[in-house]
Image (cartoon, grey):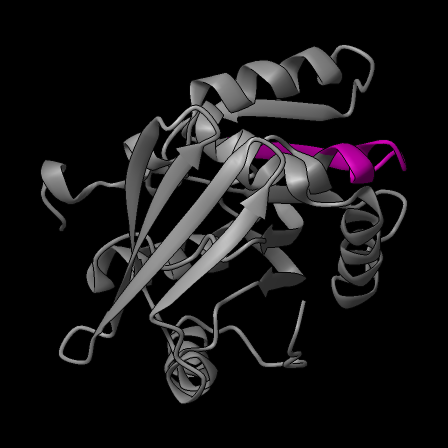
Amino acid sequence: MISPEQEWFKTYFNQDYQSWILETISQDLTLKQVELLESALALKADSKILDLCCGIGRHAIALAQKAYDLTAIDLVEEYIAQLQIFAKDLPRLQSICMDVREIDYTDSFDAIYLMFTSFGYFSDAENEKLIEKISQALKSQGRVLIDLENRDYILQHFIHEKWRNKDTGYLLERHLFNPMTSRQKTRRIWLDNNGQSKSYTRDLRLYNAHEILNLAEKYQLKLIHVWGGL
């Protein structure tokens, strides 16, 4: 179990992250990803779907607008509050503010997904436990899709530092990889046009293909397909 001071995700995902990252993602990309979710998860009209670490609900909203039955979970109160405003017009979308480590469903969903590299936040043991809980939550013949950063690709094309030019300033990303833990720390530093700065650090466990597939197999999840570049 990770210690409270290592729970970076409790402060990292906030209004700054929403404006710097989430709100810069095009609706076209979101809709293409939703099409992939529909295909990969073999969604049907009566499918019950669980969106884990849903953020501001990019995918959940788009799927609910197609009349799927959605449960969307995220730890960030501000994100869920926004999502609940949308949910007033989407009666089949339920949004819940909670830590995904606390989910406790059994044979409840036809499909479960984690998008935008939202797997790997926790200790190895907690990440594995989440896979077990996902397997438990799936109905028989249910499907799960997990969007990951590919450790092998990242190391082969490792970028130590990258600048992004934004409308209201610059975003600097600095990456460090620990080969002993297979975790990558990313420090994001925001410099606005007025010379003010803020910084946040992400600490993500990176998995390669065989690691995640071994975890899945351990909890009776069978590989259907592997994609690159979601």
Residue in view at x 81 percent, y 20 percent: 90
Question: In which image quadrant can residue 87 be found?
Answer: top right
**Image coordinates for residue 139, horizontal then vertical, percent:** 62, 54
Q: Is residue 3 left or right of residue 71?
A: left
Rendered location of residue 192, percent (x, y)? 45, 30
Where does the magenta region start and end?
61-73
Q: Is residue 28 above or below residue 210?
A: above
Q: Quadrant of residue 228?
A: bottom right
Q: Is residue 135 magenta?
A: no
Position of the C terminus by quadrant: bottom right
Is residue 62 located in the magenta-colored stretch of the structure? yes
Is residue 119 found left or right of 127 in the rendered image? right
Q: Is 152 in front, or is 162?
A: 162
> Which residue is drawn at the image coordinates 45% and 45% (left, top)?
171
- Picture quarter containing residue 217? bottom left
Q: Nearer the viewer, residue 74 or 202?
A: 202
Left or right, 56 with respect to 207, comes to right
Q: Is residue 209 above or below residue 13?
A: below
In x, y percent, where is residue 205? 30, 65
Q: Residue at x 47, y 35 (%)?
A: 17
Q: Pinpoint residue 58: horizontal percent, then vertical percent.
A: 69, 38
